[in-house]
Image (cartoon, rainbow, N blue to C red):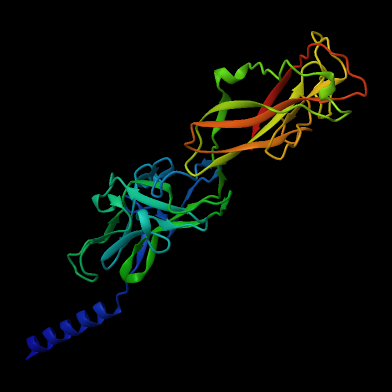
């Protein structure tokens, strides 16, 4: 009878002891001490300026941060998380719901964060996150009580959609490792602020084709003084075509071709009549250059490619993939003074282009 009572008493004590035990998890240096903060926060330095190309295909990696070695956080001996009743299921995942191109969302439109591990300190974290590993049931006397954490992690910014402007991704928590059964965070990854600089799309550019670089235009050699009726009277036009060879530019881009013509004989000329050169023997006339079908005269300006240069006009538009562009002009003689002296007419103009 005494033996039976002793056995019942022992079982009762064991039952009370198991019921009172609670799960406790803590980070610690391998070997058991010292205890580390739980969660342990690891900060990935931010970036002052990343220039991104908005034309690359979605899914392209824009930047990969240096490898993070979490095995040696807090102590060169390494670390782990110890749970008194066993780890159960451990998770490693980014913040938010993973979406396209294996990325987690960021506050910056068109850019996501991809996280992957090399499993240097634990194979369970190898591959693109999220990753999970079952260490065995919580409370199992034979279960694993130590969460061995990954080792090498990589964080990469990935293009996930349209990047329409520059901006900043603020500092924030981006990933964490947890003990699922207790929702205990073992390790929290934080990332510093990142400044994104959106590269301006590249536009096509052009150069003057060789035949157009130097042209001599015959304005006619059979005009009489009687063909001019007074100041402003003009001869028929002659065609002047400037051919451009074009290349480069991002897909879908285009550029305005801006042109300025300058008076080579009188550089300060800002009128719409090209002055005669020293080799001319005629007087009282000049040369007028027209830039469209309506006969709009070119106003001569400074030899400059600066946007907004006086006399500059939009001569054409070129799209990426267009190999050649022709700018059609016309030239004619115009009476510029009340009296005309017969002779030869020679005038020289130059042109400068800009792209916008």
**Camera-side residue of 22 and 340:** 340
- In the figure, 218 relative to 108: above or below? above
**Camera-side residue of 168 and 207:** 207
**Camera-side residue of 263 and 232:** 232
Query: Measured from the top left, where is residue 288 in percent x and y?
Result: 77, 27
Query: Measured from the top left, where is residue 147 in percent x and y?
Result: 29, 57
Quadrant of the image for the C terminus?
Answer: top right
Query: Measured from the top left, where is residue 123 in percent x and y?
Result: 24, 50
Residue 268 visible, this angle? no
Q: Residue 313 sits in which quadrant? A: top right
Quadrant of the image for the N terminus?
Answer: bottom left
Q: Residue 243 sits in which quadrant? A: top right
What residue is rendered at 39% in x and 41% in y? Answer: 67
Q: Residue 203 sits in which quadrant? A: top right
- In the figure, 310 relative to 90: above or below? above
With 54 as the anchor, is 30 left or right in this view? left
- In the figure, 313 relative to 191: above or below? above
With 186 as the anchor, is 260 left or right in this view? right
With 349 as the anchor, is 342 left or right in this view? right
**Camera-side residue of 91 and 256:** 256
Query: Measured from the top left, where is residue 13 in percent x and y?
Result: 21, 82
What residue is rendered at 38% in x and 42% in y? Answer: 76
What residue is rendered at 70% in x and 28% in y? Answer: 237
With 174 as the anchor, is 85 left or right in this view? left
In the rendered image, the residue lying farthest to the right is: 338
In the rendered image, the residue lying farthest to the bottom is: 1
Count of numbered labels shown in the rendering: 0
């Amino acid at each position: 009878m005494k033996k039976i009572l002793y056995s019942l008493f022992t079982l009762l004590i064991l039952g009370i002891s198991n019921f009172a035990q609670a799960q406790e998890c803590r980070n610690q240096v391998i070997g058991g001490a010292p205890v580390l903060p739980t969660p342990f926060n690891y900060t990935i330095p931010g970036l002052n300026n990343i220039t991104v190309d908005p034309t690359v295909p979605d899914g392209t990696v824009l930047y990969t941060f240096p490898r993070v070695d979490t095995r040696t956080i807090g102590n060169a001996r390494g670390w782990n998380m110890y749970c008194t009743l066993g780890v159960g299921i451990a998770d490693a995942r980014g913040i938010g719901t993973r979406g396209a191109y294996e990325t987690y969302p960021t506050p910056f439109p068109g850019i996501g964060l991809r996280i992957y591990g090399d499993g240097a300190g634990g194979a369970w974290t190898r591959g693109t996150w999220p990753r999970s590993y079952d260490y065995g049931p919580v409370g199992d006397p034979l279960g694993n009580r130590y969460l061995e954490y990954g080792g090498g992690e990589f964080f990469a910014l990935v293009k996930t959609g349209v990047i329409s402007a520059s901006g900043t991704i603020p500092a924030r928590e981006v990933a964490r490792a947890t003990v699922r059964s207790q929702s205990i965070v073992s390790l929290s990854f934080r990332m510093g602020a990142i400044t994104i600089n959106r590269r301006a799309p590249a536009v096509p550019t052009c150069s003057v084709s060789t035949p157009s670089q130097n042209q001599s235009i015959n304005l006619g050699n059979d005009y009489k003084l009687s063909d001019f009726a007074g100041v402003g009277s003009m001869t028929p036009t002659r065609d002047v075509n400037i051919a451009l060879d074009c290349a480069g530019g991002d897909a879908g881009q285009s550029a305005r071709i801006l042109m300025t013509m300058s008076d080579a004989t009188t550089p300060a000329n800002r009128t719409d009549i090209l002055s005669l050169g020293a080799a001319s023997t005629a007087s009282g006339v000049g040369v007028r250059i027209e830039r469209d079908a309506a006969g709009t005269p070119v106003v001569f300006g400074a030899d400059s490619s600066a946007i907004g240069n006086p006399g500059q006009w939009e001569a054409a538009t070129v799209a990426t993939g267009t190999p050649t562009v022709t700018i059609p002009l016309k030239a004619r003689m115009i009476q510029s003074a009340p009296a005309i002296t017969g002779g030869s007419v020679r005038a020289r103009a130059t042109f400068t282009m800009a792209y916008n």
